[in-house]
Amino acid sequence: EPEVTQTPSHQVTQMGQEVILRCVPISNHLYFYWYRQILGQKVEFLVSFYNNEISEKSEIFDDQFSVERPDGSNFTLKIRSTKLEDSAMYFCASVRGSGRSNGYTFGSGTRLTVV
Amino acid sequence: SQQGEEDPQALSIQEGENATMNCSYKTSINNLQWYRQNSGRGLVHLILIRSNEREKHSGRLRVTLDTSKKSSSLLITASRAADTASYFCATDGIASGSRLTFGEGTQLTVNP
């Protein structure tokens, strides 16, 4: 069964550093997402991406965050100048259509720890 | 209360029993989805029910949707120890693009 692959599985970074989280969505999927889950809390939407541009973003997704699909297969989330409160599990997801008829396929996540 | 709230927050049952989890939401939806998350792992899509559907089955899973009450339930029949996980409902709201709004989740423990 096709999978969404995320790397690394765990990243530790110092406060103020930049991190790039990587995702390889399912190849025939068209919509891509980043969500995050702070430990013990609910999963929160960050951003959706379609046709090589951001289609929607949440209040969390401020200027500190950016997304890119640099080579047609990878989908990256960059966090500039990380803060302690950015520590969370970050999940990438993709869906073939708009998601209205299909469930999303999530990756296993990247656990980001900011120290 | 917030969009996509589940109850109970935690449920502990014996293997073979049925587990029922409920979800309430506030806005109009295109569909409602249930996901499972094993500890520290990713989210696995279980089932999607559209706003014009009332009930859906998939294996041992049965989902109901009541749009008049803005609520859904997930029933897992004949539970197994391997069903131990957190279960989340997520709504695809009409006014929210294609983002999913997740609930707080129910932690299900199935004791062997």
Image (spheres, coloured by chain):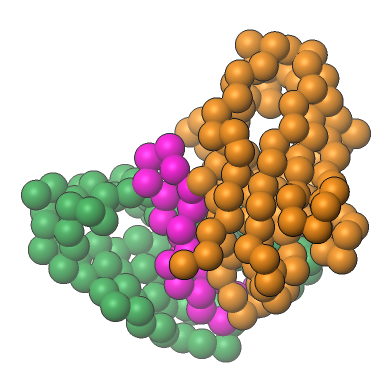
Chain colours: A orange, B green
- On screen, residue A49 versus residue B14, left or right, reads right
> Which residue is at the front of the view, B22 or A37?
A37
Find residue B25 and report its image quarter.
Answer: bottom right
Find residue B73 and report its horizontal and vertical position in percent: 39, 69
- On screen, residue B26 versus residue A20, left or right, reads left
Q: Which residue is drawn at 67% across and 47% down?
A: A23
Q: Which residue is drawn at 57% across and 88% down?
A: B52
Q: How many marks?
A: 0
Whether residue B28 is visible to the viewer of this picture, yes or no, is no
- Most extreme residue toward the front, as rendered? A71
Q: Residue at x 11, y 63 (%)?
A: B16
Residue B105 drawn above or below residue B100: above
Q: Is residue B51 magenta?
A: no
Find residue B104 and report its horizontal and vertical position in percent: 49, 47
> Which residue is at the front of the view, A39 or B5?
A39
Majority secondary structure of magenta residues: strand
Q: Does the magenta stretch include residue B32?
A: yes
> Which residue is at the front of the view, A19 or A48?
A19
Q: What stretch is highlighted in magenta?
A: B28-50
Find residue A7 and report its horizontal and vertical position in percent: 61, 38
Find residue B24 and report its horizontal and vertical position in percent: 51, 62
Residue A46 drawn above or below residue A112: below
Whether residue B112 is visible to the viewer of this picture, yes or no, is yes
Q: Which residue is drawn at 23% across and 47% down?
A: B109
